Image (cartoon, coloured by chain):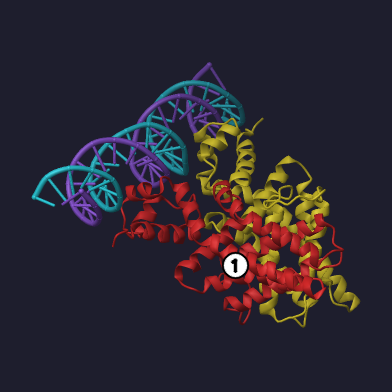
Chain colours: A yellow, B red, C cyan, D purple
Amino acid sequence: MSQSDTKIRILDAAEHLFARHGFHNTSMRAITSEAEANLAAANYHFGSKEALLQAVFERRLVPLNQQRTERLRHIVGQAEQAGILPDVRDLMRAFIEPTLTFRNQDHGTRAFVSLIGRSMVEMDSTSRDCFIPLIEPLFKLLFTSLQRALPHLPPAILLTRLQFAMGAMGRTLCAPDQTPLQVDVESSPSNSEAVAEALIGFVSAGLEAPC
Amino acid sequence: MSQSDTKIRILDAAEHLFARHGFHNTSMRAITSEAEANLAAANYHFGSKEALLQAVFERRLVPLNQQRTERLRHIVGQAEQAGILPDVRDLMRAFIEPTLTFRNQDHGTRAFVSLIGRSMVEMDSTSRDCFIPLIEPLFKLLFTSLQRALPHLPPAILLTRLQFAMGAMGRTLCAPDQTPLQVDVESSPSNSEAVAEALIGFVSAGLEAPC
DNA sequence: CAATGTTTTAAACGAATGTTTTAAATGACC
DNA sequence: GGTCATTTAAAACATTCGTTTAAAACATTG
């Protein structure tokens, strides 16, 4: 190989460990150990721990958000052409669903989706400084699209509700299999498609609630 | 003073800093420094950093959850007596509102509510191990109360939706003034009462959504 | 006042962290 | 094959962390 795959192995390990334990609770030694690479190699390839996090984000989030952007634009365009309002459920599905289908691609993307969820709920400034700029344009597009779908809703209320939706969504992406607070129920929806559908229904109803 | 107030100053500082920066990103030195106490005094009074977190939780969460439990019981009792189903909105208000009114009591409780919110969304095991046992009975009571309010809803679906609601709620309690993702709107609801009402409306609509 | 138990202080310990250094190995290219 | 940039390796560096130690200061009680 002309290019070593050490760089990729480090990216994979960082993705996995950042998703599982968070940025600050993951050491460079843990990453390079899991990647079976040398400690210095990580700093050689990426410069710093924070730059490594940035690289982890960019590798997958850019194409993923591209896909979500296109789906949102398509829905708004279709509705405009038909002379009707875009549907809230369709918009939220366009925003949520790609992350979940993305999730089922392979083991690496699976960890990455957890990392997205973590970044959405986490208050840590390091992760946020990497994550927010990458998702902000998409978020604004979602907001303006929802404004079209809900023209009667004051923008300030919509924004507040959208923050609620982000909280619900982040928690779900972060650990869809795991329910932090437990009660005994015979069976909870196990596969992530069912959880995604439930999430879309939940946040859509919340967004459409009477004011 | 027969009892030193160093212990209380340390508790206050820990509460503030844990809420603002999280458990792992707050050092014992930062806590004792803000409390104007000696580093060893903290370990003398509490034994360890983790025990300090436990003490921070217990000081306020026990009476707060007592209040929430009573409100939930009262609503269910009233409805039972009247022979009607309890109202989802009332139940969620009983669960959410006390934390917000609690919040407006003084500066210390303000920080504590942020800590609750952080603990609800955070995946960190240390915080969770302290927090979950303290809130689990209340959560189960909320669940069974909602089951009465929504008898047609399968328990598994209800649980899933309640997890979404916890995500939305945690995010809001954690930083009600701060909107992590921004768009330009003329004015967002500034006071926490308005945000709480919006939150109650949002999650109630989500819980009541058709299945 | 003396004695005793409690609280506070300053200093140090050992472990873990991100990063850097220095040198060895590897591989491409003339 | 030799030269040179690229990549790995091991070790060390400077901080920071939670915790402990040992002594001083304080308060309480006989």
Quadrant (top left, top right, bottom left, bottom right) of the N terminus of chain A: top right
Q: Nearer the viewer, residue C2 or B22?
A: C2
Query: In the visual, does A170 lie left or right of A85?
Result: left
Subunit that carries the residue with mark 1:
B
Within the image, what quadrant is residue A207 found in? bottom right
| Residue at 70% from the left image edge and 75% from the top image edge | A158
Q: Position of residue A17 (x, y in %)?
A: 61, 42
Q: Is residue A8 above or below residue A53?
A: above
Q: Nearer the viewer, residue A73 or A149?
A: A149
Q: Position of residue A36 (x, y in %)?
A: 59, 30
As drawn, the residue found furthest toward the right would be: A82
For label 1, the crowd category at 10 Å Cα-Cα, with few meaning under 14, some 14 to 19 and many 20 or more, is some
Quadrant (top left, top right, bottom left, bottom right) of the C terminus of chain A: bottom right
Label 1 sits on a secondary structure element that is helix
Q: Position of residue A176 (x, y in %)?
A: 73, 50
Total numbered badges shown on the rendered structure = 1
Q: Is residue A113 above or below residue B62?
A: above
Q: Nearer the viewer, residue B20 or D16?
A: B20
| Residue at 37% from the left image edge and 60% from the top image edge | B9
Query: In the visual, does B13 lie left or right of B84?
Result: left
| Residue at 81% from the left image edge and 64% from the top image edge | A201
Q: Nearer the viewer, residue A140 or B1?
A: B1
Q: Position of residue B53 (x, y in %)?
A: 48, 52
Query: In the visual, does A188 lie left or right of A48?
Result: right
Query: In the visual, does B56 lie left or right of D12?
Result: right
* Residue A92 can be seen in this image: no
Type of amino acid under label 1: Gln
| Residue at 28% from the left image edge and 62% from the top image edge | B1
Q: Is residue A80 above or below residue B117?
A: below
Give the labeled residue for mark 1. Answer: B67
* Residue A23 can be seen in this image: yes
